[in-house]
Image (cartoon, rainbow, N blue to C red):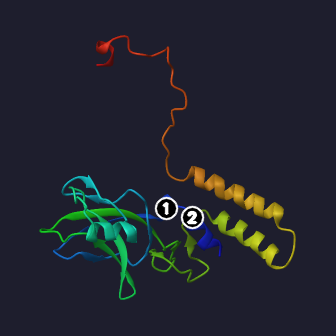
Amino acid sequence: AEIRSLRKFNWEALTIEYTFTTTTATQYDLPSDFVRFVHDTAWDRNNQLEMNGPATAQRWQLYKSGVSDAGTRKRYRIRPSNGVKKFELDTAPTSEETLVFEYITDQVFISNASGNPDSTLMSDSDTFILPEDLIISGGVWRFLKRFGMDYSTEFSEHQNLVDQARAADGGSRTLLTVISLHHDKPKNFKDII
C-alpha cells in the first residue's frame, strides 16, 4: 500500500525518457513498465514541436468527427487495444519520425541478483529506488492503524518525511515573487541590449 501511495508523485528517480520511431501506423506500444505520462513531455523531435495530448475521449471525437484544424502539431491519446494501452496518433505519419515522451515507471526496486530495476521485491537484499525511510515510516503508521493503536504521531512524521523527500527531489525553478518597479528598470532601449 505504501509503494502505491508513493507512486502518485512524479519522482525523478522513477522518470524515464522513451523515444520511438514511427512507421505508417497510428498505434504504438507503450513501454512495459509504463504507469503514466509526465505531462507536457511529448515531443516530435523531427519537427521540434510539442505534441497535443493526451487527448480526452471528447477531444478525440472532435478531432475525428468535428471541424478541427489539424495544425502542425501531432495529436495523440492513450487508448486500449485488445486490453493493452497503446499510444495512438490522430493521423498516420507519412514517413519515419522520432517521437519522445517521459513517463513514470513501475520499477521501484533494484534487484540485487541482476542489478536491474524491477517492479517486484524478490529478496531481502533488493533495494528500493526511493528513500527507504519512506517505506519504513509508512509501514510503521500503517501497522499501528491496522492493530487499532494510535498512529497520529507516526503518520504526521511520515507525511513530513514524504514532504521533505518531494521537496528535495529533482530541481525546481526560482519563482519571481516581487517585481521591482523602481530598481533595475531599463532607462531606455539601449539598456536592454
Asked whether, in this view, residue 122 is left or right of residue 1, the answer is: left
First in sequence: mark 2 or mark 1? 1
Residue at screen point 37% across, 65% down: 54
Asked whether, in this view, residue 94 is left or right of residue 141, the answer is: left
Residue at screen point 72% across, 61% down: 158
In which image quadrant can residue 99 be found? bottom left
- Which is more toward the observer, 37 or 71? 71
Residue at screen point 56% across, 80% down: 121
Q: Residue 130 carries which label?
A: 2
Q: Where is residue 108 in the image (x, y as percent from the top left)?
A: 52, 71
Q: Position of residue 25 (x, y in %)?
A: 20, 77
| Amino acid on which the number 1 mark rests in the picture | Ala
- Which is more toward the observer, 56 or 65? 65
Q: Residue 49 carries which label?
A: none
Query: Dot 2, how many residues are within 10 Å of its Cα: few (below 14), some (14-19), or many (20+)?
Result: some
| Amino acid on which the number 2 mark rests in the picture | Leu
Q: Where is residue 156 in the image (x, y as percent from the top left)?
A: 77, 59
Query: Dot 1, how many residues are within 10 Å of its Cα: few (below 14), some (14-19), or many (20+)?
Result: some
- The answer for how far apart the CA atoms under marks 2 and 1 are is 7 Å
Residue where numbered disc 1 is placed:
13
Residue farthest to the front, as pictured: 67
